[in-house]
Image: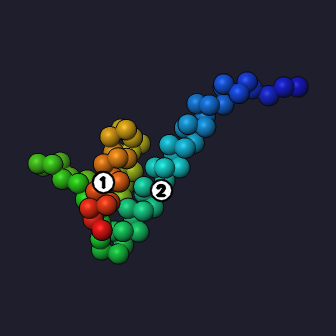
Amino acid sequence: MAGPPAGALAPILVLVVFLAVDAWVYADAKARSERRAPVVFSAGSFRVDTPVAWLLGCLILWVVFFPLYLTCRRNAG
């Protein structure tokens, strides 16, 4: 019996990669927050400064929040 075609596994693999990256963002933001060096983004009254906020942002709009996290992380030191 043959398994699913290779093309059917690609979306699952992409989803697994996105979820792994989101888990890393949460773990990294939490570790930095515990060291009292949180990763923070602020624009007007919009503020992302907790590990949960970074995780939710990445889950909802990964293409914006993941690069933003990397940029803010670099600036945080």
Residue lying farthest to the left in this orientation: 44
The reply to whether residue 9 is in sight is: yes
**Tag of residue 71:** 1
Give me the disc on residue 42: none
Sequence-first disc among 1 and 2: 2
Determine the residue positioned at 54% across, 38% down.
15
How are the residues colored?
Answer: rainbow
Percent of width and height locating residue 42: 18, 53
> Is mark 1 in CB contact (under 8 Å) with mark 2?
no
The answer to whether any part of residue 49 appears in the image is no
Q: In percent of the image, x 32 and y 60: which residue is there?
A: 73
| Cα–Cα span, label 1 and label 2 | 15 Å
Q: Quadrant of the N terminus?
A: top right
Q: Position of residue 17 (x, y in %)?
A: 55, 44
In the picture, residue 34 is in which quadrant?
bottom left
Left or right position of 41 against 62: left
Q: Residues within 10 Å of mark 1 (few under 14, many from 20)?
A: few
Residue on which disc 2 sits: 24
**Amino acid type of the residue tagged 1 in the rendering:** Thr
Amino acid type, label 2:
Trp
Which percent across, then down, holds residue 31? Answer: 41, 69
Q: Nearer the viewer, mark 1 or mark 2?
A: 1
Asked if residue 77 is positioned above or below residue 51 in the image, the reply reads below
Above-or-below relation of 70 to 31: above
